[in-house]
Image: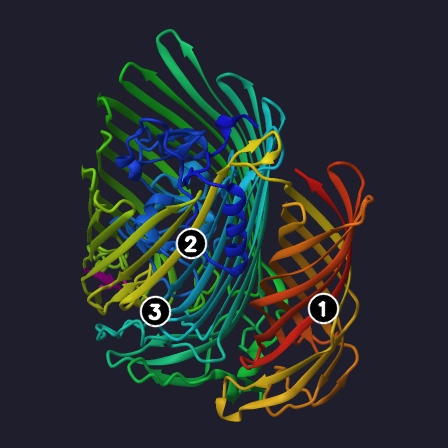
Amino acid sequence: MRKSARHKGHALGSGSSRQALGFMLALAVGGTATPAFAADEAEGADSSDAAAEILVEGTRSREVVEAGPLGTRTILETPFSVSAADTDQINRIAATTIDAAFNYDPSVRSNNSGLASGNTFSIRGQAVDLTNGYKYDGLAFPYWFQDHPIEAVDQIQVLKGAGGFVYGYASPSGVVNFISKKPTDELVATAGFSLRSSSIWRAHVDIGGPLTETGSTAFRLNAVEEQGTLYNGAYNKNTFAQLWLEGEITPDLTWSVDGYYQRTWQAGQSNTVSFTTGVTSLATMSGADFNLASKSTHKFNDINQVTGRLNYQIAPDWKISAALRYSALDERFTGNTAQITNNAGDYRVGVLGMNRKFTYHVGQLSIDGTFHTGAIEHAVVAGFDYLDVDYDYDYNPYTATRVPTVSYDFNLTGNIYANNVPDWAFVSYTRADGQVVTGRQFQRPPDWFRYQEIRQRGLFLSDTLKLGNAELMLGGRYTFYTERNYEPVLADTNYRENSFTPVAALSYDVAHGVRAYVSYVQALQRGTQAPANALNYGESFGPIKSTQYEAGIKVDRGTWGATLAAFRTKVPSEFLNIESYWVRDGERRFQGIEFDAHWQATPEVLLKFGAAYLDAVQTKASSAALVGKKVPGATAFQTSGFVEYSPAFLPGFSAFGGVRYSGKAYGQVTNTFIYKPVTVGDAGISYNLPIEGRSITVSGNVQNITNEQYWVPGSGGVSLSAGAPRTFSLNLTVSTGPIERDDTGWSEGSGTGGFYIGAAAGGTKINDGSFDIRARVNPTLGVDRGGLKTSYKTGWELAGRLGYDFGFLRTELELARQQFDLDRVALNSTRIAVDPVSRTAGIYDDPSGTTRIQSILLNGLADIATGSRWSLEAGGGIGVARVNQYRWKLEADESSTFAYENKVRFAWQAVVGARYALSDRLDATLRYRYLNVSDVFLQTTTANAIEGSFRTHSLLVGLNYSL
């Protein structure tokens, strides 16, 4: 792999890499986390400009935007407004969630308080499209209300306004692109640990570097584990792992494969909180006290994604790129929503079993390059892309129409100020046909049907003509779009649309680092389907065409920079009218001005300021009473200020403070509800201490210092969430590297032995399990000791190792996965509900489901030489293990799952084995492994819990290869 094509590792100091990496491995296994290493600065680079620069193509250069037919451009060169939050910026403001990364961008607003499942955005007053508006490394993926860990991204880019042209059918609000961390030239490693309000613990490990001596193949591994209690009392858990591999086939033909798995689980967490047209005002309350979910509410998200890419440099100025992606989201959400019905805060509870599956197939083929016609330089991008989305839903037999919607038939009510949320799981009602429906029936496994199919094919072409200081971009996209919406929704609608959308932009370099631009773009977006609370639920009116005009000026002068943009967008409007029908009626106009500036006033002081004014108005409507009304949910004025102080007398220390103001917004199309303005202040400190080839960073921050109470508008202006109260976060990060390779292996100094990698596989046996059943829904029931017992079939194990051989001692970082099928279950007590259909106590000889154990351990091993090719080993390891109950059922032929949960706990192991030297670099291995994971607390689908331990015995054969 050519060095210029990969990120540099950040040099953190001198010293022994062996000691640094050994310490790093111990931290990784112990579970510590937060941001990864920063990009390296080229010699002579101005570090004060860090907010506007990142590492690109192996050198320090201006931050680039990669956006399909727009090509690859710097932010300064892009004729649209762009915001970016890179690792430096994320660390600077101590952001712990995706939405917090843009706290100080006044034109980007989170649609919730950061608690409800999924961090979604509104840009310039409009929600980002969930189907095609969120990207992962430039390609669509199912970002449907998931919580992506911020540690896994190198940068988040927001392209404002031009999303429909760049990526096909998408909201004209813009596009949010998550850019993942890529392989590095040198071996680097980071581990961290963080705690945030009220008791959310997060561990993060980030390791990357070349896999071969020549550096032609490299990897990057990121893993994040988070769990604990949020400030409103809800339980949250997030498991994430991503691996990126890249290499070269020839010097001009390179490949990459990346993939990630994520599992999120929330229990007792508020979902949508809407309000009726009769609600005109609500007294604000603290986010710590606002949680309208019952204890039985829980939600799982499983996300799997794999992407492959090829890049071929066919000439010095021309490149062909191809990419394919498979991505799938499986959501299981059994819980409740709340609808506030009056100004006193009374609400009714809606029960739902929202089970959804999204499957994405994405592809893109493009060619880009430059050529000249006389004095004019052309930069051309052309290509083809496609997006296939299959959306499966769950029949709901407990509503009159079987439509997968919310049921208010249980007649459950409460008051938001009284903290008296009723639990839907223990109530029932009788339907008109005499059938008794219980809340527990909503916890059943899904009965899938095809709900929607989207097929999008696109051809795009753009040509940027440059002559002197002037630049003209002309482009177009022709999109073939088909959408099929199936029964049993109330309206079976399908439509097909073939359309052309143009873009044009003129830019002029007024002076060095100063560029003015004007742009025009047309875009198409999907017509919204009528939501579940509409009388015409499921109906869609076909695509929406929008137009946007924008003019602005951008300045980047090293120590300071600024962007000023004015825009105007017209969009046909869709909303829920006062008769509760979803309608397309009239037109909305979004126009405004944005300003953002940063200034490195001195080497010690960084200042930032931003402001955005938005005039979002209903300009046309069949009802004259709606004309001139403000677009619901759109905030008219937002501003922010930020200062960071890094004193020269205390190297490595910095402190920051920031203020954010969000102005008035309106709710409902009639503007009868008002979200009041709020001003929130934040502060934090950070101290970086470089020690012996590694860096230790300790940081902490407080958000909402004055503990303001306020409502956060939902994107449509018919829902709300309570703003976060005063919260804190504490972070510890340890980084090591870069570790250079010399003739004897990875080294920064003298020493014996070297690094090796290994892999092994074999059979494994797990001891019979005995679990206590603990009541969580009704804690007065206490604990049934030994209430559940399990036995398992013989399983399998796969393991991988990265180790260092000191001669007579070795240390290893070992990753392993074990899997066992249930063989027998003894349910000894039913006093505390475990199974949702309330089966009787007894022996179940035909259960189904698996137990999966993924472990990360740091091993210490003693080598015993025998004077031959054979050597013996003995030792042990400590670390963490993730135990997963995958769809445990008492009876295989039944659909009811009683456990589908995972937990990370401390683990230890004992190891004995032997090695046989096949060559100077390759050893065959035989190893016995005893693994112990104790005190595992796992929630059942009835929201109670089982507690027990897992002990396994494995016999593995494998290979070790010395690097």
Binning the other alpha carbons within 10 Å of mark 2 as few (below 14), some (14 to 19) or many (20 upward) gives many
Give, as a three-letter code, the residue at label 3: Glu
* Mark 2 vs 3, N-terminal side: 2
Residue 579 - label: 3
Q: Is residue 827 above or below residue 257?
A: below
Distance, label 2 to label 3, CA atoms, is 49 Å
- Seen from the viewer's position, the closer of residues 144 and 680 is 680
Question: For the image shown, how many numbered marks are present on the structure?
Answer: 3
Front residue (pair 741, 534) = 741
Q: Quick check: 947 above or below 150?
A: below
Magenta stretch in the rendered image: 664-672
Q: Is residue 367 visible?
A: yes
| Residue that label 1 marks | 952
Instruction: Identify the mark at residue 962; answer none if there is no mark.
Output: none
| Depth check, front residue: 907 or 792 | 907
Spot occupied by residue 379 in the image (x, y as percentages of width and height): 42, 20
| Sooner in the amino-acid sequence: mark 2 or mark 1 | 2
Q: Amino acid at mark 1?
A: Thr
Of tags 2 and 3, the one toward the viewer is 2
Dominant secondary structure of the residues highlighted in magenta in the image: loop
* Residue count near mark 3 (Cα–Cα under 10 Å), binned few <14, some 14–19, many ≥20: few
Q: Secondary structure at mark 1?
A: strand
- Disc 3 and disc 1: Cα gap in Å? 61 Å
Q: Left or right: 130 with respect to 761?
A: left
- Mark 2–mark 1 Cα distance, whole angstroms, equals 31 Å
**In terms of sequence position, does the residue under pointer 3 or pointer 1 come before the other?**
3
Q: Is residue 526 visible?
A: no
Badge 1: residue crowd in 10 Å (few <14, some 14–19, many ≥20):
some
Could you tell me residue 133's position as x and y percent? 43, 47
Q: Which residue is mark 2?
A: 34
Residue type indicated by callout 2? Thr
